[in-house]
């Protein structure tokens, strides 16, 4: 029996082979079964070398699209802030821009 305590959100390492690197998992849920064992629902993390080229292309495409959307969100927030700063300066307030 292991003396380790794990919680939801913890990252754990799995050894599937003594010659392979550890696999990385994050615990999403912990459930106790009727017979007293604990089952864990985990999120799996993969190294690029461990997935197919098709999936790498898909992941890269998703990453690029996600970053583009994040930049658009940042630009719209910046526009709102600039508008607010212009309004504030008209109201006679000192505005510091970093």
Image (tube, grey):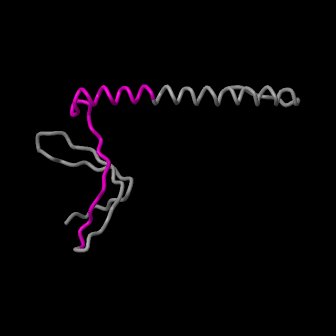
Q: Where's residue 26, x and y in %?
A: 33, 49
Q: Where's residue 80, x and y in %?
A: 70, 30
Instruction: State the image quarter where residue 1 is shown.
Output: bottom left
* Farthest residue, direction right: 92
- Asked whether 15 or 56 is in front, the reply is 56
Q: Is residue 25 left or right of residue 70?
A: left
- Residue at left 38%, top 57%? 8
- Asked whether 5 or 44 is in front, the reply is 44
Instruction: State the image quarter where residue 91 is shown.
Output: top right
Which quadrant is the C terminus positioned in? top right
Q: Is residue 84 left or right of residue 1?
A: right
- Asked whether 58 or 4 is in front, the reply is 58
Residue span colored magenta: 36-65
91 relative to 3, above or below? above
- Residue at left 61%, top 25%? 75
As for residue 50 lying within the magenta part, the answer is yes
User: How many discs appear?
Assistant: 0
Instruction: State the image quarter where residue 31 is shown.
Output: bottom left
Q: Where's residue 22, x and y in %?
A: 21, 43
3 relative to 61, above or below? below
Q: Is residue 36 left or right of residue 82?
A: left
As for residue 51 lying within the magenta part, the answer is yes
- Residue at left 35%, top 26%? 60
- Residue at left 29%, top 28%? 56
Q: Where's residue 2, x and y in %?
A: 22, 63
């Amino acid at each position: 029996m292991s003396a380790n305590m794990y919680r939801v959100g913890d990252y754990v390492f799995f050894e599937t082979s003594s010659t392979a690197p550890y696999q990385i998992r994050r615990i999403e849920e912990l459930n106790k079964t009727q017979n007293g064992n604990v089952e864990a629902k985990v999120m799996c993390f993969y190294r690029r070398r461990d997935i197919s080229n098709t999936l790498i292309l898909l992941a890269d495409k998703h990453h690029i699209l996600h970053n583009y959307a994040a930049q658009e969100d940042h630009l719209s927030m910046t526009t709102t802030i600039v508008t607010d700063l212009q309004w504030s300066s008209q109201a006679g307030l000192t505005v510091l821009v970093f």
